[in-house]
Image: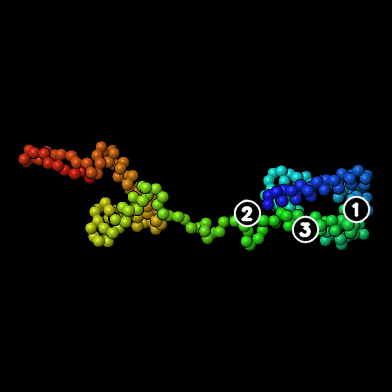
Amino acid sequence: MYVVQRTGAVAVALFLLLFAVLGFASGQAFFSTRGQSVLGMSSNGLLSTLSVVVAVVLLAAAVRSPRTASTVMLVLGPLFLLSAFVNAIVIGTRLNWLAFEVSNVIFSVVVGLPMLLIGAYGRIGSHLPPDSPYAHPDTDDAEVVDERPSTPEEVAAEEAMREAEIAVVQHTATPDQRARVEAMAHVHHRADRRRVWMELDATARDRARHDGTSPARRTTLLHPRAGRRVPRRRG
């Protein structure tokens, strides 16, 4: 697809350059309404100059990228067709500034229509192939976000979240579980709820690290009356 678009732009540009060079070499007047015959068509200085400009634009677009060449041809193709229509009306009048003849009109159609088709090739259509570089992703699929856990930490967080929610419903939840479920109630998406849970986990770990203990670490305190040590679990 890219090769076709780039090759088409270069081929049209080279022909226009040849047409312009031969037109300048014929010594034609710049604004003559009756031009010199070049490659079976009529041309004057203005038409040769426009041919050079269009050829340079096509070559620059082809060098930049096939996508740019496609866009340029989608613009120039209709312009060539419009030029054929307008200049066909002014042939034989003082407004024939490009010295057009019937052969020029035919050439504009023969060049403009292929440029339009080549520029649209593989780019415009209701059913583009999946491997087309111009194929746009389905907007419905693009809006679907995969919220499933993707790491072991997220899987563990999902299991803990489920246990906490079940415990809250069954009125057997710990204060920490109730607080976490209430914090998750402010968000609605699964990924956001998991993020809130994991942030609370991180906060608990930081607090335990700051205290120099862990939630499951036991310390011993001296009993105030009996003078003996008793185990105590620190939260």
Horizontally, is 233 left or right of 204 in the view?
A: left
User: Percent from the top left, x then y, of residue 25?
Assistant: 91, 43
User: Percent from the top left, x then y, of residue 65?
Assistant: 68, 46
Q: Residue furthest left?
A: 226
The CA distance from mark 1 to mark 2 is: 39 Å
Residue 129 in view: yes
Mark 2 Cα-neighbour bin, 10 Å: few <14, some 14–19, many ≥20: few
Mark closer to the observer (1, 2): 2
- Tell whether label 2 touches label 1 (CB within 8 Å): no
Label total for image: 3
Quadrant of the image containing the C terminus: top left
The amino acid pointed to by label 2 is Ser
* 117 lies above or below 209: below
The image quadrant that residue 137 belongs to is bottom right
User: Percent from the top left, x then y, of residue 171?
Assistant: 23, 60
Residue pointed to by mark 1: 40
Mark closer to the observer (3, 2): 2
Going from N to C along the chain, the mark reached first, 3 or 2, is: 3
Residue 182 in view: no
Residue pointed to by mark 2: 132
Residue pointed to by mark 3: 113
What kind of element bears circle 1?
Answer: loop
Say which residue appears at 41% left-offset and 57% top-offset: 189
Going from N to C along the chain, the mark reached first, 3 or 1, is: 1
